[in-house]
Structure formats: structure tokens, C-alpha cells
């Protein structure tokens, strides 16, 4: 009877079903977009910035002093290679300093790298927009970010002076020439990070053959915690950090966006609830005599309440699957082709570390919470109409 009742006014019922479908589609689309953005951000952190795991001297992360190295890196690398999950180990020297040019000065972090592993570790080769990177037979070359180049008015071949402290805390000054200009997904890093040869930087600071950081890439993202535990037990005197420890703001962003996505879903369903409520109240008012008659014939209030509840449920559940299906098809389409968000502002996206081309992912793991929200919405929307129906007195209803 409840199913037949909703088709007594086909136009009104279809409008509500379509509204619910569109609401579900919008909710799923927002969830898929947020999911894609978070996956993109995590991939940027792992593939271009931190790697899966980093190893430092325990005091280096706190004080960032040049003297805190991880010791004999060659022996450490041989030990670490015994862990089967690891695919790449990258050595870096890290020094905080000042960049000076005729146009001014800027605080920077100087990274001494081996290009053979750095290009794979941080995708540095793919980031280069001008120049040829660090050429082996040339000395005192530097790769700088596009934002820093624009700020300091530098171009390929420009001279710059780097000032930093060595292991004895003496000031070292060295001249470099810009060999390449890179652009990454994270604009704030482009304004701060400068890449030079690890061998040359090591000689300048008195740490030839040593390094401050070992960056590690794994076969699978799921192996991070297991590999970190193995490394901590293998290297008790060093600090082992996963990408979540190094970039806690990314982990916080993921949790925050998950919360916001559910809030948006609740707002959408709350708006739809008013439409469902209005429709059911109109249906109850139109069928006052009918409800009075079935009550007079002995139908219990419980059954009348259940009748209204089922009508609301059928309206909601008829539209929800269509919206979820449309959201799934749309998410899968853009997951293959990508969704270009450059219209929102490439500079703005890069300031927050996001790529402009996002690949939405259908939030399958969020379907149960979403359906729970839908069911609760249907139930709450039916309460007022159902209460109105069961409060009708049969004699008064039949007189109307």
C-alpha cells in the first residue's frame, strides 16, 4: 500500500526522487573530489618531498646543526638494504643558510644531493623547467626554485652567494651559478630549497662522505609502518620518521577533510529532508478522509505510522541508488581523464601543495556512513507527517 501511495501523484514523487538523486550525486561527487585531492597531496609528499621514511641524527631534527650527522652512511646503507620492502635509499646533506645577490638576501635551505638517486627520490629531474640540472664536469652549480628565482631576479647562469656554518660553527661563504630552475607542486618549498652537489657541499662544511639524512622509498605505501619498525630496531641510536611524522600537517589535513566531507553530506541531506517533509505533509493532508476511514475500520496507529514511514523510505531509497550510481560513473570517468582545477588558480593550489590536475576517487569506504546518513534523514523526515497522521481522530477526518 505504501509503494502504491507514492505513485498516486507521480509528478510530485518523481520530483522528490530526482532531488534526492541529485543530492546524493552532489554528496558523492564532493567526497570523490576530496578523496582525490588528499590522495594527490599524499602522493606529492611521498614522491616529491619526504619519501616514505627518513633517518636523521636524533638532535638534528631539533637543532638543525651541521655537526649532527648519521655517521658512516655507507655501512648504514648496507644494513638497510637487507630490508626487502626498500627500493631506494637517497643521501642528503642539509644546511640552513642565506642566499645573497645584488638584489637582496633570503633565508634558504641548501641540500647537497647525488643526482643519480635524487632524481628518482624527489622527481627533481621532472621538476626542472629551465637548464640542465647538475652537470658532472662543472663545479659550484645550484638548482633553484622558480619562485625564488623570480623573487631574487635570477636566471640561468646568474651568480649567487651562499653563506652557512660548517661543523665548527665557522661562517662559510661560497659562490655558485644557477644551472637550472625547477618548479614543484609546493610553491613555498620552491622559495626556500636550493640543490647543490653533495660532494662540494660536504667539502665546504667539513663532512666529506657523510650525510645528515637518509631518505627511503618503499615498494608499497602499506609497508611504511612495518619498515619503520624494522629500522627502529635495527638503528636504535638514530631517529626514524615516517612521512606522517615529517609532514603532520598533511595527516591533519586528511582527517580534517574527512570530517568536512561528512558535514557537507549532512548539510545536503538536511536540505533534502525539508523537501521530503513538505511532500509527506501534503500527502497526509490530501488523504485525511482516507486515513480516517482506515483508522475507523480498525487499523492501528502503529500500522498507520509504519505506512507513512515506509512511504518516506521508498521515496528516499528510490532516489539514493540513482544518485550513488551517477556519482560512481562520474568519479570513475574523471579518475581516468583527470579533473583540471587550474581555473581555481594554479598559484593558489600550489601554495597549499596541491596539483591542479586531480583524479577523483569513488569513496567506497564511506558508503556505509553515507547510507546511514540517508536512512536517518528518511526516518527524521517521516516523524512529523507520521505523528500528524496517527493523531487524527477518525470522526473528524471523515467529516473533512
Image (spheres, rainbow, N blue to C red):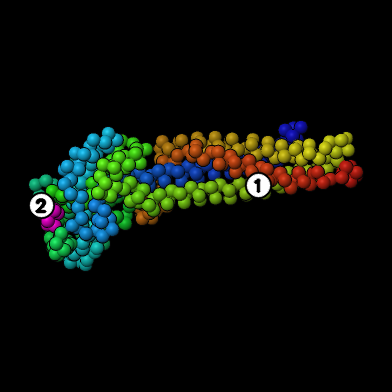
Q: Position of residue 244 (x, y in %)?
A: 36, 48
Q: Position of residue 114 (x, y in %)?
A: 17, 46
Residue 273 is marked as 1
Query: Which is more toward the observer, 331 or 311?
Result: 311
The stretch in magenta equals 200-207
In this picture, residue 288 sits left or right of residue 105: right
The correct choice, above or below, for 244 with respect to 319 in the image is below
Q: Position of residue 395 (x, y in %)?
A: 90, 43
Q: Position of residue 61 (x, y in %)?
A: 27, 55
Q: Is residue 205 magenta?
A: yes
The correct choice, above or below, for 181 with respect to 324 in the image is below
Q: Identify the residue at horizontal 20%, vertical 41% (top origin).
A: 77
Image quarter of residue 12: top right
Residue 332 visible from this viewpoint: yes
Quadrant of the snapshot with the C terminus: top right
> Label 2's element?
loop
Would you name the residue on which mark 2 appears? 139
> Label 1's element?
helix
Quadrant of the snapshot with the N terminus: top right
In this picture, residue 163 sits left or right of residue 241: left
Q: Is residue 283 magenta?
A: no
Amino acid at each position: 500500500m505504501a509503494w502504491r501511495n507514492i505513485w498516486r501523484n507521480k509528478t510530485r514523487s518523481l520530483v522528490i526522487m530526482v532531488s534526492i538523486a541529485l543530492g546524493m550525486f552532489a554528496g558523492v561527487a564532493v567526497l570523490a573530489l576530496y578523496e582525490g585531492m588528499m590522495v594527490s597531496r599524499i602522493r606529492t609528499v611521498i614522491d616529491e618531498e619526504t619519501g616514505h621514511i627518513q633517518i636523521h641524527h636524533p638532535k638534528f631534527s631539533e637543532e638543525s646543526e651541521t655537526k649532527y650527522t648519521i655517521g658512516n652512511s655507507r655501512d648504514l646503507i648496507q644494513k638497510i638494504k637487507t630490508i626487502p620492502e626498500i627500493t631506494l635509499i637517497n643521501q642528503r646533506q642539509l644546511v640552513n643558510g642565506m642566499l645573497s645577490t645584488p638584489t637582496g638576501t633570503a633565508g634558504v635551505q641548501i641540500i647537497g644531493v647525488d643526482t643519480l638517486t635524487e632524481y628518482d627520490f624527489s622527481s627533481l629531474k621532472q621538476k626542472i623547467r629551465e637548464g640542465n640540472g647538475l652537470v658532472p664536469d662543472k663545479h659550484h652549480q645550484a638548482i633553484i626554485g622558480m619562485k625564488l628565482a623570480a623573487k631574487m631576479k635570477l636566471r640561468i647562469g646568474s651568480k649567487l652567494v651562499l653563506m652557512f656554518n660548517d661543523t665548527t660553527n665557522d661562517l662559510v661563504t661560497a659562490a655558485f651559478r644557477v644551472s637550472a630552475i625547477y618548479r614543484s607542486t609546493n610553491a613555498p618549498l620552491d622559495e626556500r630549497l636550493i640543490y647543490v652537489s653533495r660532494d662540494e657541499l660536504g667539502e665546504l662544511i667539513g663532512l666529506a662522505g657523510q650525510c645528515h639524512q637518509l631518505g627511503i622509498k618503499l615498494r608499497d605505501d602499506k609497508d611504511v609502518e612495518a619498515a619503520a619498525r624494522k629500522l627502529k630496531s635495527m638503528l636504535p641510536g638514530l631517529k626514524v620518521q615516517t612521512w606522517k611524522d615529517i609532514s603532520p600537517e598533511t595527516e591533519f589535513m586528511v582527517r580534517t577533510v574527512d570530517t568536512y566531507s561528512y558535514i557537507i553530506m549532512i548539510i545536503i541531506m538536511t536540505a533534502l529532508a525539508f523537501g521530503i517533509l513538505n511532500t509527506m505533509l501534503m500527502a497526509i493532508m490530501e488523504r485525511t478522509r482516507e486515513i480516517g476511514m482506515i483508522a475507523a475500520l480498525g487499523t492501528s496507529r502503529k500500522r498507520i505510522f509504519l505506512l507513512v514511514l515506509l512511504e518516506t523510505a521508498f521515496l528516499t531509497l528510490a532516489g539514493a541508488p540513482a544518485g550513488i550510481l551517477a556519482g560512481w560513473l562520474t568519479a570513475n570517468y574523471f579518475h581516468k581523464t583527470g579533473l583540471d582545477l587550474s581555473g581555481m588558480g594554479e598559484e593558489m593550489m600550489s601554495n597549499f601543495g596541491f596539483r591542479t590536475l586531480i583524479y577523483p576517487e569513488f569513496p567506497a569506504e564511506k558508503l556505509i556512513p553515507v547510507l546511514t546518513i540517508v536512512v536517518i534523514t528518511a526516518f527524521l523526515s517521516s516523524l512529523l507527517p507520521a505523528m500528524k497522521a496517527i493523531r487524527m481522530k477518525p470522526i473528524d477526518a471523515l467529516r473533512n
